[in-house]
Image (cartoon, grey):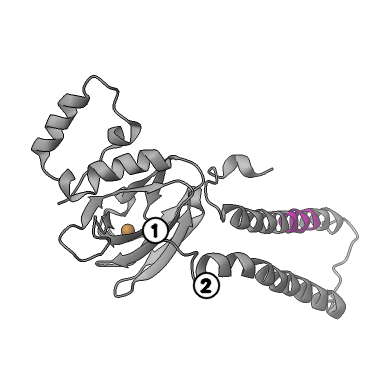
Amino acid sequence: MLDWWLPENVSTYGRDIDWLFHLIYYITGITAILVFATMLAFLVMYRDRPGRRARYTHGNTTLEIVWTVVPSLILVILTFLSVPAWSKIKMQAPPPSDFVVQVTAKQFNWQITYPGPDGKFGTEDDKTLLDEMHVPVNKVVHVNLKSQDVIHSFFVPQFRMKQDAVPGREILQWFEATKPGKYELPCAELCGFGHSGMRGWIYVHTADEYKKWAAENLQAAAAPAADKKAEEKKDATTPAPAAAKMGGKAKK
Ligand SMILES: [Cu+2]
């Protein structure tokens, strides 16, 4: 019912988050309405009228116990209800995957590093992109999150995923996107003067499109610009695939 104002969910665990979000929203919304209605009723009922004298009251112990115990119980129940989603997304080991990307946050960019053809990070053939990540759809992606300077926050609203990047730590976060598209990756932690401009994009491709993109942008052979130009000439007659149009700003 409230879905119209949340960004579209395109993540496997998004429903678990949305369900909790809506539950908490309804509970706090109904509570707010009850509190304000009572307050308005009391304003009218106990307004000043000629001949009416103020009455001194010591309060009502039963009522005070009730309005302390009930909200406490609700909070405890909400905690227990959120445990499954929290442990699935943050506590348990993520679903196994051979797709690992390194994300290093810095003022004010996301540096996305792919291991390159050898599948290992920290080697010559690593490929680093600035502010863009490309992943296949329906694939568990492991993100190794680091920060070069201050605390940043890796946030993809459509994935219902948010994780702080903390200097000195390497934090493993994961997601599985369920729909191809281009999704915003803003920094959700006030990290300095350029914070508001710190954003990247996550391109979720179909399996085929991703293969094409990876072949063009991640393979060692993809680097020389001269080869690329020759290829473009060859391909000039056929329409360029969507993945190629999205392109990659390779850093090295
Ligand atoms: Cu930031």
The type of residue carrying mark 2 is Met
The secondary structure type at the circle numbered 1 is strand
The answer to whether 32 appears left or right of 114 in the picture is right
Q: Nearer the viewer, residue 69 or 117?
A: 117
Q: Which residue is drawn at 70% across and 74% down?
A: 76
Please report the bounds of the magenta region as a residue range.
Answer: 30-38
Q: Distance between the residues labelled 2 and 1?
A: 17 Å
Relative to 188, is 230 above or below? above
Q: Which residue is drawn at 57% across and 70% down?
A: 87
- Tell me where residue 108 sits by quadrant: bottom left
The answer to whether 7 appears left or right of 21 in the picture is left
Q: Which of 115 and 34 is in front in this view?
A: 115
The type of residue carrying mark 1 is Phe
Question: Residue 17: x percent and y percent?
Answer: 59, 57
| Residue 248 makes an appearance in the image | no
Q: Which secondary structure type mostly characterizes the magenta part of the structure?
A: helix
Question: Residue 72: x percent and y percent?
Answer: 72, 74
Dot placed on the residue nearer the N-terminal end, 2 or 1 = 2
The N terminus sits in image quarter: top right
Residue at the left extreme, as displayed: 226
Question: Residue 193: x percent and y percent?
Answer: 27, 56
Q: Residue 25 carries which label?
A: none
Q: Residue at x 53, y 43 (%)?
A: 7
The residue that label 1 is drawn on is 154
Q: Which mark is residue 91?
A: 2
- Tell me where residue 207 sits by quadrant: top left
Whether 33 is among the magenta residues is yes
Q: Which of 185 and 226 is in front in this view?
A: 226
